Amino acid sequence: MRRHVLTGRPLAGEHDGMSGPLTGIKIVEVAGIGPAPFAAMMLADLGADIVRIDRAGNVSGGSPDLPPGDLLTRGRRSIGVDLKSPEGVEVVLQLAESADAFLEGFRPGVAERLGIGPDEMLARNPKLVYGRMTGWGQDGPYAPMAGHDINYIALAGALAHLGRAGEQPTPPINLVGDFGGGGMLMALGLCAALLESGRSGAGQVVDAAMVDGSASLMTMIWAFQAMGIWTDERGTNMLDTAAHFYDTYRTADDKWVSIGSIEPQFYAELLRLTGLAGEDLPHQMDQTAWAELKDRLRGVFAAKTRAEWMEIMEGTDVCFAPVLTMSEAAQHPHNVARGTFTEVAGITQPAPAPRFSRTPGEIRRPPPHAGQHTDEVLTEWLGADTAKVAELRAGGAVA
């Protein structure tokens, strides 16, 4: 029987047909919002067996045939636990004893007060990787404060550079802090720590802060600034909407297209396909002419519909794509051919990424109702018999 490279455990796929490079990895996740569930979703998509700890008070007994719409919780099983009950805390500690990783998104100190902090967990399972997802991090002056994505990317030095010249900073939904700089960073951190733990036999704490991750995403811009090709003034640089060859343009049917013709050969294609190639124009990188050239391109793109520009520019090296809504993106031929989106339980959603040639990821199950798998998890992970499950239920430790 094949065994997992990190844990030495038999691969779950050996007996249940599951796939994914993290098959065989067991993770306990405490329910939260935003980045931590996103990290767990990515890990579940890649094959990890994840049990989600939901609050016992949130258990409502919803029908499994009508799964919730919170796609960030897909792929996991849920157990309802009262974390204010000593018996409930003991259930979580026992789950962590047989897990490879634990993931929580509390404010600093909350897990310790509940009795499920790193010290308690690692005492039970010295090989455990303990993931802590916060906005500000586990220490520092802002650590105890509340916050959201917009605040974390503001402090990280990212938000100030998002938007057009003369206008206020524009938050890019909550993609940068919560998901790019938060959940994805946590998923990477857990995978790296699991790899190291598999070699050393020792666990550790992964402190993933959205402010750190958002700052990390800005590394190339810091490099540009060091090279003297980026200023702090928003909307005046090549990649932040100042350049005429890197922006979006409105079309005749009030839709939009995106242009990213940075390299000279791609810029030459832009001029050719827009009919400007024969004109005596300023040099592409002459920033004093960018505003004038952008006005020229606005007029050109406004003369045709988005579909007409797609006909002209798709299949070329101009660096072009139509600006699509979510529903349009799910139907675009490229995304359909790639299987970028999929449908599970009647809901269209992004498919697992990235792709793996031999161990592809998959969405194993739709989002669970809180506590939907309590009995199943207690039996499978802890070996609890029917009498023990009934005892825990009767005492209110689980629901």
Image: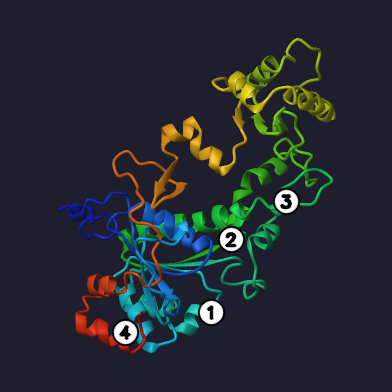
In which image quadrant can residue 276 be found? top right
Label 3, residues with CA under 10 Å away: few <14, some 14-19, many ≥20: few
The answer, for residue 192, to whether it is visible in the render is: no
Query: At 67% from the left edge and 33% from the top edge, which residue is drawn?
Result: 256
Q: Residue furthest top?
A: 278
Q: Nearer the viewer, mark 2 or mark 4?
A: 4
Q: Which residue is mark 1?
A: 109
The type of residue carrying mark 3 is Thr
The type of residue carrying mark 4 is Arg
Query: At 65% from the left edge and 32% from the top edge, which residue is drawn?
Result: 258
Sequence order check, earlier mark of 2 and 3:
3
Q: Nearer the viewer, mark 1 or mark 3?
A: 3
Measured Cα–Cα span from mark 1 to mark 4: 28 Å
Q: Which residue is mark 3?
A: 170
Sequence order check, earlier mark of 2 and 4:
2
Q: Which residue is mark 4?
A: 393
Q: Is residue 86 left or right of residue 376?
A: right
Secondary structure at badge 3 equals loop
Residue 188: percent from left, percent from top:
45, 54
Quadrant where the image shows the C terminus = bottom left
Evaluate if marks 1 and 4 touch, with contact meaning CB atoms under 8 Å apart.
Answer: no
Label 2, residues with CA under 10 Å away: few <14, some 14-19, many ≥20: many
Sequence order check, earlier mark of 1 and 3:
1
Label 4, residues with CA under 10 Å away: few <14, some 14-19, many ≥20: some
The type of residue carrying mark 1 is Gly
In which image quadrant can residue 377 be found? bottom left
